[in-house]
Image (cartoon, coloured by chain):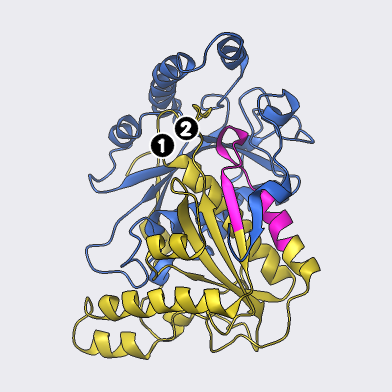
Chain colours: A yellow, B blue
Amino acid sequence: MRLRRDVRGNRFTQQQVPQQVIEQLLDAALLAPSVGYSQPWQFVVIKQQKIKQQVFDSFSQENEYASTLFKGDRQDKYKQLKLEGILEAPINIAVFYQPSDEPVLGQTSIKDVGKYSVVCAIQNMWLMARALNVGIGWVSIVDPNVVKKVLNAPQQNELIGYLCVGYVSEFLDEPELKKSAWQQQKDKADVVSYDQF
Amino acid sequence: MRLRRDVRGNRFTQQQVPQQVIEQLLDAALLAPSVGYSQPWQFVVIKQQKIKQQVFDSFSQENEYASTLFKGDRQDKYKQLKLEGILEAPINIAVFYQPSDEPVLGQTSIKDVGKYSVVCAIQNMWLMARALNVGIGWVSIVDPNVVKKVLNAPQQNELIGYLCVGYVSEFLDEPELKKSAWQQQKDKADVVSYDQF
């Protein structure tokens, strides 16, 4: 957990990821908890450069828009950051939530918990990847509807995460956005309280 | 990951959870990835039985409603399941998402990714707990607005997970809902595809 990092395109190497490693990542995902044991996940492992390119095009467009939301120095800094590794990573994995047609035990009061199960699966993969010396970067600057279309996803599925996966030149000792002073680390005391806020 | 379980009230023991263990769980949570390094989490560690009781009351009400959604044999089976350990667990931890007032890097296309960061923190806690022989159960059958009120949570915060935490009499070898045939395990081949659906 301490050594896990979000990895971008400037760190991925071209070393191939063996199928056995991909299977280990998927197996870790499938060990995640899921509400009502619903296992509401779908994984698409992407190797074709043509498909990655279409996702990258969506990133480029969304990132252009995103940069306009930051002002002044912060916008300059934003534009200098490398925020994805879609084309550089040998493997991409798109992770979807697939809603159930029937009521799901535990999902009757808070509908979103089904999606949270899928996130638990992603975090399991991320930790397993690190244990295998494989890096993962989570790209969230994409249009989920474009990704769905590119991957021919069923209408009702929802994109939860788009992951870039590969071996890396290095794992930074601290999160990149902390090192670059984009954002400070919060104090534990400011995010923990006892019995009530 | 393989040995982690969702633990309910019939497994928790009354053995006290030392503060050091609580700190280790929180430290694991704080090592989670977060979009734009936003660390959008808030943890409320609950020990007072009075507060737990109010959350339990919300569970009871929501669970009564939930049971009506399942029909026939399935409803009978539902009613026999022990689905939480709010009062039995020595510690409860409510985990909230705290939205930012400013644009967050990476959260500009898919707003929900901020909440997903909080889920990653929960999964880290869950795995760390298991490594320390501590059980966690995630209760999602509660009214999030009632929990917010009981815990005096700021208006803009969103409840992501309500966790019951404690030592356990046993960790089952497989998920309880699989063992009791409530839900079958899915085949890996049915949830993984390559390049496209």
Q: Is residue B182 magenta?
A: no
Coordinates of residue B58 in the picture (x, y in percent): 38, 23
Q: Residues within 10 Å of mark 2 (few under 14, many from 20)?
A: some
In terms of image quadrants, where is residue A181?
bottom left
Identified at 31% across, 67% down, the residue is: B108
Q: Residue at x 76, y 32 (%)?
A: B170
Q: Which mark is residue A111?
A: 1
Is residue B26 visible in the rendered image? The answer is no
The x, y position of residue B32, in whole percent, is: 52, 62
Left or right: B142 as drawn, with respect to B173 = left
* Residue nearest the viewer, comparing A148 with B67: A148
The residues bearing labels 1 and 2 have C-alpha atoms spaced at a distance of: 5 Å
Chain to which the residue tagged by mark 1 belongs: A
Q: Secondary structure at mark 2?
A: loop
Numbered circle sitting on residue B65: none
The reply to whether discs 1 and 2 touch (Cβ–Cβ < 8 Å) is yes
Which residue in the structure is indicated by mark 2? A107
**Please, what is the three-letter code of the amino acid marked with disc 2?**
Gln
Q: Which residues are magenta?
A: A24-43
Residue A104, x across and y down, in percent: 52, 29
